[in-house]
Image (tube, coloured by chain):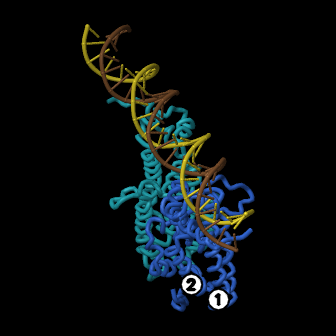
Chain colours: A blue, B cyan, C yellow, D brown
Amino acid sequence: MVKQERAGRTRQAVLLAAASTFADVGFESASLVDISRRAGVSKGALYFHFVSKQALADGVRAAAGREIGSAALRALRAGGPAVQDLVDLSHELARLLREDVVVRAGVQLGRAGHGPRREHGDPSGSGAAWRSFTAVVHRLLGRAAEAGELRPGIDRWAAAELLTTLAAGLVLLAAEDTARLGPEAVRGTWAAALPALVDAGRCAAYRL
Amino acid sequence: MVKQERAGRTRQAVLLAAASTFADVGFESASLVDISRRAGVSKGALYFHFVSKQALADGVRAAAGREIGSAALRALRAGGPAVQDLVDLSHELARLLREDVVVRAGVQLGRAGHGPRREHGDPSGSGAAWRSFTAVVHRLLGRAAEAGELRPGIDRWAAAELLTTLAAGLVLLAAEDTARLGPEAVRGTWAAALPALVDAGRCAAYRL
DNA sequence: CAAAACATACAGACCACCCGGTTTGTGAGT
DNA sequence: ACTCACAAACCGGGTGGTCTGTATGTTTTG
């Protein structure tokens, strides 16, 4: 029952090595020997912390989910103009995707999505992740609508799904060209998409 | 020296079986025995037509590329209002993705993108496919701008990349929920996104 | 010293690819 | 028209290698 703190370090090392390997070559092509070598531990140590390869992937996804979730929470709590908060959130997520291997591996594992077929309950399919992303966006849009920031007569759910689709598109395209997650690229996307949400005249009011 | 026509049939059968298998379980998890069983031929026949598993995947991608390319060409040739042509093209692509296993497998193979690392020349990375998609959209937007359909002062390249990103997003999200490629879903996306391209008043002029 | 944490060796399975052999079609020669 | 020779097309078992997961032994830590 005595947890050792060294264990935490190796667990983290394994998680990091796994994330970087998954991000590099994908789930199926990643081998556990390779991961354990990168982590500087043995396969036995790996299996001590994660009972299976799938559990390892789940661990990576969970860690990525925690990071993304906390970013979303911060955006919900920030009390600025809601659309501005939305823009800021997108930049923060892009930064995570650029710089954080765990996040990158997490969404990448969601993309391929070919483990054992997720069944009905499906608590961990990446579909749920995107749905909750849409929900966050929808709440921010609600605040924006109250403040009169949005074009009148806009369907907030449709707009939220639009932004979700855009985010998913960036994720997909970034797999081939990481520059699409750079600040300028995100800014450009916003510049093109913002008129769908906000009156053309007011677009200049936001710092993209 | 003389091609037999039975060969064409088996080659096609193998291609179809491979597409459906790849679409189901992904490239890595697909086994050649399984594919040949589904095609109703032997492993030897498979290897007669495709020298390697990678070649098989390339064949599927090429076939999918041909279908998508011809749809794009049709859209470029159709002489209607350019924005309407764009909408119609999107519906056609969505239909292909819904109903055509080969197309579905083709983009799916592009998504995972974890074969032997594509090098510099990279003629077959899916990045190139998306780029040429952007180019098609850009040309259609050019026609639309000439006809005065677009909002003034729009950056056509940025708009084309926006639509490409949207398409990529739909592809990614459709992997989890095929309904997103249904006509109503596509229509909804257009309804939300069109104001970014066209003056709000004129949106009603298009049949989404 | 006991349990936790880690290492090593091995078992069992799978898979891509190879290869010798068989069948099927085709065109030339008669 | 009929055979024959040859190549295209197809078959299916074998092979080498790799991979996940387990079983068992060793060190580290509270």
Instruction: Indicate left or right for A117 with A42 as reference.
Output: right
Instruction: Report in which chain the residue with disc 2 lies.
Output: A
Task: Please tell me how crowded label 1 is: few (under 14), some (14-19), or many (20+) other residues with Cα within 10 Å.
Answer: few
Query: Which of the pair A82/B48 is nearer the observer?
Result: B48
Instruction: Report in which chain the residue with disc 1 lies.
Output: A
Above or below B183: residue D16: above
Residue at the spot of label 1: A78
Where residue B81 sits: x, y (%)?
48, 67
Residue at the spot of label 2: A88
Where residue C3 sits: x, y (%)?
73, 63
Above or below A72: residue A170: above
Q: Which residue is drawn at 68% across and 63% down?
A: A124
Label 2 secondary element: helix
Instruction: Indicate left or right for B187 with A173 as reference.
Output: right
Query: Residues at badges 2 and 1 in contact (C-beta under 8 Å)?
Result: yes
First-in-chain label (2 vs 1): 1
Q: Which quadrant: the N terminus of chain B? A: top left
Q: Which quadrant: the C terminus of chain B? A: bottom right
Query: Which of the pair A118/A103 is nearer the observer?
Result: A103
Quarter of the view holding residue A155:
bottom right
Above or below B105: residue A149: below
Q: Which amino acid does label 2 sit on?
A: Asp
Q: Which amino acid does label 1 sit on?
A: Ala
